[in-house]
Amino acid sequence: MTNVKNIKNVKYKIPEKYLLVYLLGIYLIIVSLFFDSPKDILNGLKNIILSPDNLITDYVKVGGMGGAYFNSGVLTILSTFLVRKTGATLNGPLIAAIFTVCGFSFFGKNIFNSIPITLGVYLYSKFEKTEFKNYLLPALFGSALGPLVGEIAFGFGIPLSKSIFFAYLAGIIVGFVLPPLSQAFLRFHQGFNLYNVGFTAGMVGMFATAVLKMFDMEVETVNIISSGNNIKHAIVFYFCFILMIIIGFILNNKSFKNYKELLKNTGQLMADFISLYGFPITLINMGIMGIIGTTFILIIGGDLTGPTVGGILTIVGFAAFGKHPKNTIPILIGVRLATFLNTYDSLSASTLLAALFGTTLAPIAGKYGVSAGIFAGFCHAALVANVGYLHGGMNLYNNGFSGGFIAATLVPIFDSIISAIERRKRYYEKQ
């Protein structure tokens, strides 16, 4: 009997990485109950699911604080369960994917609009006769196109009996094409745009928006933003990020060993910090990056809203997969510098998101230095404000879309400059 018990314990034991991510989802659900009653949360979830979801739709405004936090907690748990169910090892890329789902569940992702895209990726894995766990990244990141599902279902006044069918059909098709496209587009920016699926989703979203316009179905970006919740959000997430650092510190034998080595990594895809430096030090980096992102918004006088919270959580996730203070701060400086010089509102939601999500270009700063990172951030701020109309806000990872073009443009230029400098050095050394 003892042996049977031991076998059962081994079978159902949850690894610490999975456990901590599950706890994040549970934490968000518990927090939601402090903000709103269960009845208000359910009403909020209903409003969230029935909203079209295209950029920028703040679920805190649509469904209340309780509804937004509950939605995020549930999707975090479901995403983690999906990954664990496939038997995949929870590495840096998957941590980034789960935290991205967690973050975007505050503005654009919900269970209704995510299911068909995940199903489409699953069908693609069956078509390829490959294990689904090999396509978990496009399955999770692919819900960036969730607004396409929501818009078709609820945005055009089509009877629900027809609209939901067509919405889910569109979602399944999108999910089916994302895996091969994301692999192909990775070569376009050479891994210097961390939100690779964001670039892919932008291309797909652009095509989908064009098709809808053919049938006189206009899709426009929106600006539904909450305000006045800085203290509430800050308390919730500062506590979470500080706890990450403490847990990581304890698991790392009460030290910051290997953190200097992590900071030397350029961050270029695929930089799996968990595999390279271990989970404890990666967890410390995640907590530090969360504090940097939150403090950045508060120091410049911005609002902690659903979208900016989503941006911060995405940074935290990618702190396991390419981002650290050394390669992200130059990008933040570059975007911020651009906002001082341009005509846009420096504290608007879109401008704040450009800074947070602009850190998709962190590998440029990591490889080419601080000046290159600042310049990349500056260029990103200019471009990202002018590409959203191409996909009508259908692609939640608009900054990943912009980042792909910036990386593809700047990297060859920087390589050319470096090559020219090295040739000159060799020439003068021979003299």
Image (cartoon, rainbow, N blue to C red):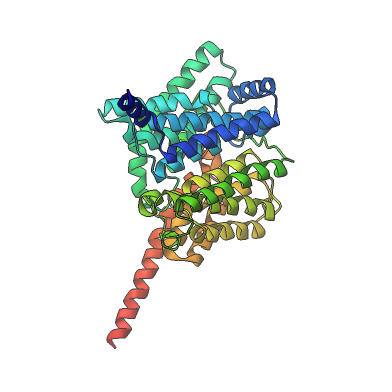
x then y, percent, for residue 17: 43, 41
Q: Is residue 415 visible?
A: yes
Q: Nearer the viewer, residue 238 or 418?
A: 238
Q: Quadrant of residue 18?
A: top left
Q: Is residue 203 visible?
A: no
Residue at 50% x, 61% y is 326
Q: Nearer the viewer, residue 343 or 268?
A: 268
How far across and how far down the image is residue 88, in percent?
Answer: 34, 35
Q: Toward the viewer: 107 or 200?
A: 107
Q: Residue at x 26, y 30 (%)?
A: 130
Q: Point out the residue furthest to the top here.
A: 161
Q: Where does the N terminus fall, quadrant-wise? A: top left
Q: Is residue 278 left or right of residue 59?
A: left
Question: Is residue 188 left or right of 24 when viewed as pictured?
Answer: left
Residue at the spot 39% in from the left edge and 37% down from the top edge: 137
As drawn, 67 above or below 293: above
- Give the residue at x 38% y 51%: 269
Q: Position of residue 41 (x, y in %)?
A: 65, 24
Look at the image and tell me in which quarter the C terminus lies.
Answer: bottom left
Q: Position of residue 31 (x, y in %)?
A: 64, 34
